[in-house]
Amino acid sequence: MRARRSLRATALLATLLAFWQTPPARADGTLVLISGSAQLQVAHDEAVAQFFVELQDGELARAQSLVNQRAADGVAALRRADPKAQIETAGYQTYPLYGRDGARRVVGWRARQTVTLRTTDLASLPKTIAAAQQYLALAGIDFRLSRAARERVETELIQRALANLEARVTAAAQALDVPKSRIRIEELNFGLPVLDRPPAVPMARASAQSAEAVAEPPLDAGLSLQQMTVSARVRLGGN
């Protein structure tokens, strides 16, 4: 499938470049700036979920030990629920708690560990999230396109944008009564794909307290609108 798409994109580009000729020393004909565009609405196929565990205790070592164990249990639950997911642990923080008597006396410690899940198994995601929430609090979920999906979409956007540009160049030439043999593309520029996606799903901040069963959350990966433009400097007519 990818090979066929690449061949179509190559054929479209070859058609456009067939208009290319070395510009004459004298700038004759009519120079026009024409752009083509394309957009696609694509379903998200990847999710990035942020979890954390935050606990406190009067002793630093115990606070860290509690967080370490809870984070390890959460990671194990994620691996069991989604063995192919990418899991990262980062953002470990420990900071003191001070009393309210104004003496700046340390009365306890708070420790926090962050866990990130990246997965393309969206069908099992609600179950995976619920399994992790027995040990970890969910900070948020971001639905997006995977790298493979972005590459496929970019290929199709290029095809459509080139086809749109070719149609506009042809229409401009016809409007000015210029034959195809006297169309010259002097410059071709591709714009970067533009991704418009909804913000991350907000989740209430909470601390994980016990390994209790959690109901599966309702999740909808949603869609994103991707766009691309291609512009050209085209000389119509002249010698």
Image: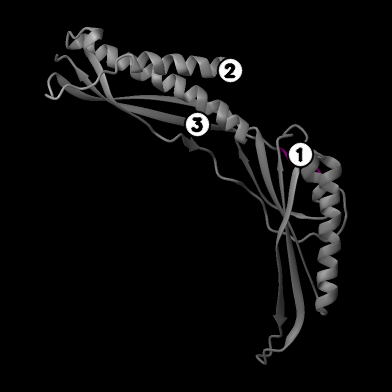
> Is label 3 or label 1 in front?
3
Which numbered circle lies on residue 126?
1
Q: Is residue 156 above or below residue 216?
A: above
In this view, the residue in front, 60 or 222, is 60
Residue 55 image point, x, y percent: 78, 68
Magenta residue span: 214-218
Residue 150 is left or right of residue 175, and the answer is right
Is 161 positioned to the left or the right of 2 in the image? left
User: How far apart in space, not on screen, are marks 3 and 2 (Cα)?
Assistant: 24 Å
Query: Hey, what amino acid is under mark 1?
Result: Pro
Q: Identity of the amino acid at label 2?
A: Ala
User: In this rendering, which labeled residue sits more in front, label 3 or label 2?
Assistant: 2
CA distance for labels 1 and 2: 35 Å
Provide the residue designation for mark 2: 3
Residues packed near mark 3 inside 10 Å, few (<14), some (14 to 19) or many (20 plus): some
Q: Of circles 1 and 2, which is in front? A: 2
**Residue type pointed to by label 3:** Leu
Q: Residue at x 67, y 40 (%)?
A: 47
Q: Which color scheme does this rendered protein use?
A: one colour
- Look at the numbered disc 2 and give the secondary structure of its residue: helix
- Element on which disc 1 rests: helix
